[in-house]
Image (spheres, rainbow, N blue to C red):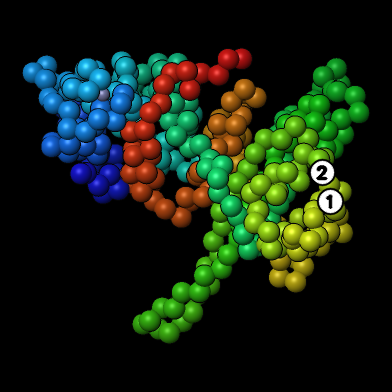
């Protein structure tokens, strides 16, 4: 099986994958072995190779290509372009726009948009994850600033945290520290690690946020928040709750802060405003998933992310999963 994390540049990637057959061979070797081809329809092992290059399942009678059940199924775009696109998406820390991707791989912007959204489905957050230890919670509002809008476009009574023109997003960042000893010098270095979960929410009322907190944060954890009223409803029997009073310019309490989750918001805004400029509300969940994935893997190199993305791409993904009805 090819180790995709070995490609440290576009040059190395395109030199290696210089034909469609090479790409198909890499997909084959990552999914199956010559002696064990598995049917993507029924899961039967030991399918046989046909003379036309496809495969046949004795059990369910299906014939299938190496691309069936992957993100590449039924694609009209060359696999080499897909591989380069996925590499670029992995390497650009703040993401890549459809305009830029279209130029880079020489496709129409519509095609680039489609590739980006299809790849974005691979970033889906793991909803079974449970955060524990110290978890910072915070909310942000995505949408136009009322103060910058023309008088005629202003929405009445929407100063501050209104959900009429802005979409609230709720984020939780687990923060833990690791001490690493440099054995040559004996020096101890503390590394701060984070893992973030973020979700679009209807509003930031306690009745909305508490079920999310209880779903994603293990009992016994310490929750750090700002002074938003809703957080006073955090169950004191389940969690220790610390809050920083941002209104009074207080940012650290007893060594705890909300710096981790604020780092995520900064990253999210740079991606949305710096790269995409505009995100449709219909697809906002995907952009949140993408930002979370990028933030959680930010210490890893682009090549590692590409390797991860490639293996995710071999799972089933159909067009209906990509297009959301508006
Ligand atoms: Zn089968």
Residue 9 rendering spot, x and y as whole percentages = 29, 44
- The answer to whether residue 292 is above or below residue 164 is below
Determine the residue positioned at 86% across, 23% down. 155
Can residue 148 be seen in the rendering of this structure?
A: no
Res 236 quadrant in image: bottom right
Ligand 1: quadrant of the figure: top left
Q: Which mark is residue 233?
A: 1
Of 298 and 277, the residue lying toward us: 298
CA separation, marks 1 and 2?
A: 6 Å
Q: Which residue is mark 2?
A: 206
- How far across and down, in percent of the image, does residue 271 sit? 56, 38
Q: Where does residue 56 sit, x and y in percent of width and height?
A: 18, 21
Give 57 or 239, whichever is nearer the viewer: 57
In the image, residue 57 lies at what x, y percent? 20, 23
Asked if the residue at tag 2 contacts the one at tag 1, i.e. Cβ–Cβ closer than 8 Å, the answer is yes
Apparent side of residue 246 relative to residue 318 in the rendered image (left or right): right
Q: Judge whether 43 appears above or below 132 on screen.
A: above
Residue 122 located left or right of residue 190: left
């Amino acid at each position: 099986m090819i180790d995709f994390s070995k490609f440290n540049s576009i040059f190395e990637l395109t030199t290696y994958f210089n034909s469609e057959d090479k790409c198909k061979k890499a997909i084959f070797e990552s999914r199956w072995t010559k002696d064990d081809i598995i049917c993507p329809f029924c899961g039967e092992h030991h399918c046989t190779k046909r003379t036309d290059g496809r495969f046949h399942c004795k059990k369910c009678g299906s014939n299938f290509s190496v691309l069936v059940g992957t993100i590449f199924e039924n694609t009209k775009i060359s696999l080499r372009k897909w591989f380069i696109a996925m590499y670029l998406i992995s390497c650009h820390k703040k993401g890549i726009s459809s305009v830029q991707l279209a130029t880079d791989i020489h496709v129409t912007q519509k095609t680039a948009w489609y590739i980006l959204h299809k790849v974005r489905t691979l970033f889906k957050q793991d909803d079974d994850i449970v955060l524990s230890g110290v978890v910072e919670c915070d909310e942000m509002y995505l949408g136009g600033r009322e103060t910058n809008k023309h008088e005629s476009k202003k929405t009445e009574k929407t100063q501050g945290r209104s959900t009429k023109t802005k979409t609230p997003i709720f984020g939780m960042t687990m923060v833990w520290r690791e001490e690493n000893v440099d054995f040559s010098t004996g020096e101890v270095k503390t590394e701060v690690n984070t893992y973030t979960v973020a979700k679009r929410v209807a509003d930031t009322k306690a009745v909305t946020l508490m079920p999310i907190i209880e779903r994603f944060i293990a009992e016994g954890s310490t929750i750090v928040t700002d002074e938003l009223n809703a957080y006073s409803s955090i169950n004191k029997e389940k969690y220790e709750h610390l809050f920083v009073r941002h209104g009074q310019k207080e940012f650290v309490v007893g060594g705890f802060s909300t710096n981790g989750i604020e780092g995520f918001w900064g990253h999210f805004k740079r991606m949305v405003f710096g790269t995409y400029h505009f995100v449709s509300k219909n697809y906002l969940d995907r952009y949140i998933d993408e930002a979370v994935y990028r933030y959680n893997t930010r210490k890893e190199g682009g090549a590692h992310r590409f390797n991860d993305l490639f293996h995710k791409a071999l799972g089933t993904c159909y067009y209906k999963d990509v297009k959301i009805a508006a």
